[in-house]
Image: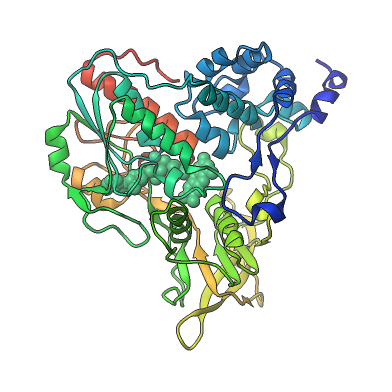
Amino acid sequence: MTRQNLEPAKAQRIEFGHQSIQERIKHFKDFTIALTDEQIQVQVRRCLHCGTPFCSASCPLHNRPVDFNRLVRDGKWRAAWECLNATNSFPEFTSRVCPAICEAGCTQYYLEDAAVGIKTVERAIIDRAWLSGWVRPAVAQQKTAKRVAVVGSGPAGLACAQLLARAGHDVVVYEKNARAGGLLRYGIPDFKLAKELVDRRIEQMQAEGVKFELATAVAVEKFPLGVHSDACKVIEADELRRNFDAVVLACGAEVPRDLSVEGRQGKGTHFALELLQGKNKVLAGEIRQAPVSAKGCDVAIIGGGDTGSDCVGIARRQGAGKIYQIDISPCPPEKEDKELTWPDWPYKLRTSTSQQEGCERLWSTATKRILLNDNGEVRGIECVKLDWSVDEHGRRISKEVSNSRFEIAVGRVFIAMGFLHAVPSLLDAFGVQTDARGNAQAQIETGEHPFATSVDGVFACGDARSGQSLVVRAMSEGRRCARAVDLYLMGTTDMPPWR
Ligand SMILES: Cc1cc2nc3c(=O)[nH]c(=O)nc-3n(C[C@H](O)[C@H](O)[C@H](O)COP(=O)(O)OP(=O)(O)OC[C@H]3O[C@@H](n4cnc5c(N)ncnc54)[C@H](O)[C@@H]3O)c2cc1C
């Protein structure tokens, strides 16, 4: 292939359309505009059908874009959905919230900086599949009489429960919150993922025999600060172990990293999820008023990642004034050195749609104090600039820039500094060993029993095992864990090894 005959391809990468910023910040709904059939044809025809498809290798689910692109190109939409469905439990979620790691591995991205729009094609396939009635309950033909309890209904728990039920096991999902979905439901804002899509999947799974025990906490009476629970009953770990043949811990890594600085206890500082969950619950009609709002306030969001970016989008829609997103790290480069990084996910500057809606990003900035007024309410933050360098061991280190202190006047502070690990008392109740970071210890790549914890019959997957990650990785772990559980229960399994 020559550079010359690839030139038109570059011009033809088409991203999702978006409502204008002025329009979309008036509401909390999905504001993306899917591609037309003609645009999808342009995308799939740009696929080079590489002999070694790095896109598949990059995707944690090992989706097969080369195959489904070809099927869509040939008008074989149902076969394209079957291809996607073979590797991806919930493409309607990933085609909306995934950062599209596959596209970073696309050869067109390497050659021309313009990957095939794999995510847009994925969404076109799954949306058509639902509309056409192809996505139907896949009820097991034979039951095994084995019972599995899944703790947590996020993407890991759902993906795991779905496959186990289809394999004929009786599956009960225990969820401490009022509705199923984990962070898909109570973290990711509606404008990124409409909750009707989650409801539709849950209904399909119920029709396949999965039972959901909602507002039921497993083993934990009192959750740590920053971890929300709607539970009105608690079921003990021993009871689950007695009543089920296997237990899967898919309980996420919910304990948030806190900011221990003077003024943290003042009124007006909240964990990010208090803002995000609260708004999602209001929009779902679960509560009338959000526990916290950014309306009319200037806001500082501490943490430069995706959770922080979601806070920007919600705060903007609630009518915040100025929004600052504080990042301790230096500003990444605008472009990566592909010779060094491709086909891996590159470290480079990314600007989310929420950030485009209006926020000032402050890089290499550490928060020293939260400033309070005489009533103990937040009136600002005091920051300092950092100078980053690399030490003799290749580790990034920072030191404060002298005389760089400055203040920002804000009325709300949201802490979006990531998540530490799963809730310790839950893991303790099952007696499972934890890793150095406090998550459930279970091997996935090696060993005879992947996803098995130190306790016989207890498995762990998703963020509860890996630490805070991505929907696509949680789903991938849930699927592979289902296979491990099936093998444990039956001594053999028909589920293909996913990798
Ligand atoms: C604000 C935010 C936005 C994000 N946005 C994106 C994004 O756009 N794209 C992306 O790919 N990733 C995103 N992520 C990351 C992604 O959501 C997670 O990696 C993923 O949801 C992890 O799935 P999981 O099933 O392992 O855990 P979770 O989704 O956390 O689900 C765990 C579930 O277990 C339940 N649970 C916990 N303890 C108990 C107990 N004792 N008893 C009963 N139930 C219990 C919890 O209530 C929860 O519902 C985001 C994360 C956050 C916080």
Which picture quadrant has residue 491?
Answer: top left
* Residue occupying the point 44% across, 77% down: 266
Quadrant in which the N terminus appears: top right
Q: Where on the image, by quarter, is ligand 1?
A: top left
Counting from the top left corner in percent of width and height, residue 375 is at: 46, 86
> Where 89 sits versus 242, above or below?
above
Front residue of 15/302: it is 15
Counting from the top left corner in percent of width and height, residue 461 is at: 35, 35
Left or right: 340 in relation to 158 = right
Residue at the extreme bottom of the image, as rendered: 374
Q: How many marks?
A: 0
Counting from the top left corner in percent of width and height, residue 212 is at: 28, 37
* Residue occupying the point 29% across, 44% down: 175
Which picture quadrant has residue 205?
Answer: top left
Left or right: 487 in relation to 131 = left
Left or right: 300 in relation to 219 = right
* Residue occupying the point 55% across, 12% down: 79
Work out whether residue 468 can be spotted: no
Left or right: 355 in relation to 200 = right
> Where 3 sits versus 266, above or below?
above
Work out whether residue 109 can be spotted: yes
* Residue occupying the point 50% across, 48% down: 188
> Where 429 sits versus 273, above or below?
above
